[in-house]
Image (tube, rainbow, N blue to C red):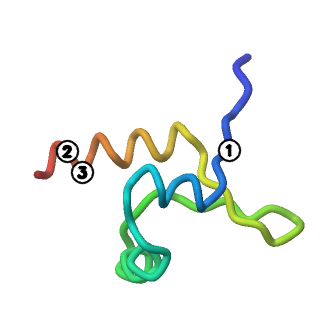
Amino acid sequence: MAKRELLKLSAVLEEINMSRAAFYRMRARGQGPRLIKLPNAQLRVDRADLDSWLAACQIAA
C-alpha cells in the first residue's frame, strides 16, 4: 500500500501560484482541493486530491 503524501498548505499555494487569501476565497465558494485538519490544527492537502482537482480545472478550462 502506497503512503499518502500530505502537503503543507504553503507548498500547495506555491505550486498553484496563489495567495493564501485567494485560496480561502476560492474555498469559501466551495472550490479547491479538500483540506485535511490534523489533530494539532495544521492543514494538509493530500497529493492525490490536489492532482485530481488540478486535472478537473484543466478539463473545465
Which residue shows up at 66% across the image and 55% down it? 8
Say which element carries label 3: helix
Identify whether 52 is placed above or below 19.
above
Amino acid at the residue labelled 3: Cys
In percent of width and height, residue 61 lies at 11, 52
**Which residue is denoted by mark 1 in the rendering?**
6
Q: Earlier in the sequence, mark 1 or mark 3?
A: 1
C-alpha gap between disc 3 and disc 2: 4 Å
In percent of width and height, residue 16 lies at 38, 54
Q: Residue furthest left?
A: 61
In percent of width and height, residue 12 lies at 52, 54
Amino acid at the residue labelled 1: Leu
Front-most of residues 9 and 1 = 9
In percent of width and height, residue 23 lies at 43, 73
**Which residue is denoted by mark 2 in the rendering?**
58
C-alpha gap between disc 1 and disc 3: 20 Å
Mark 3 in CB contact with mark 2 (< 8 angstroms): yes
The quadrant in which residue 36 appears is: bottom right
**Which residue is denoted by mark 3 in the rendering?**
57
Identify whether 37 is placed above or below 14.
below
The quadrant in which residue 18 appears is: bottom left
- Quarter of the image that includes the N terminus: top right
Q: Earlier in the sequence, mark 1 or mark 2?
A: 1
Q: Residues within 10 Å of mark 1 (few under 14, many from 20)?
A: some
Decide if residue 61 is on the left or right side of residue 22.
Answer: left
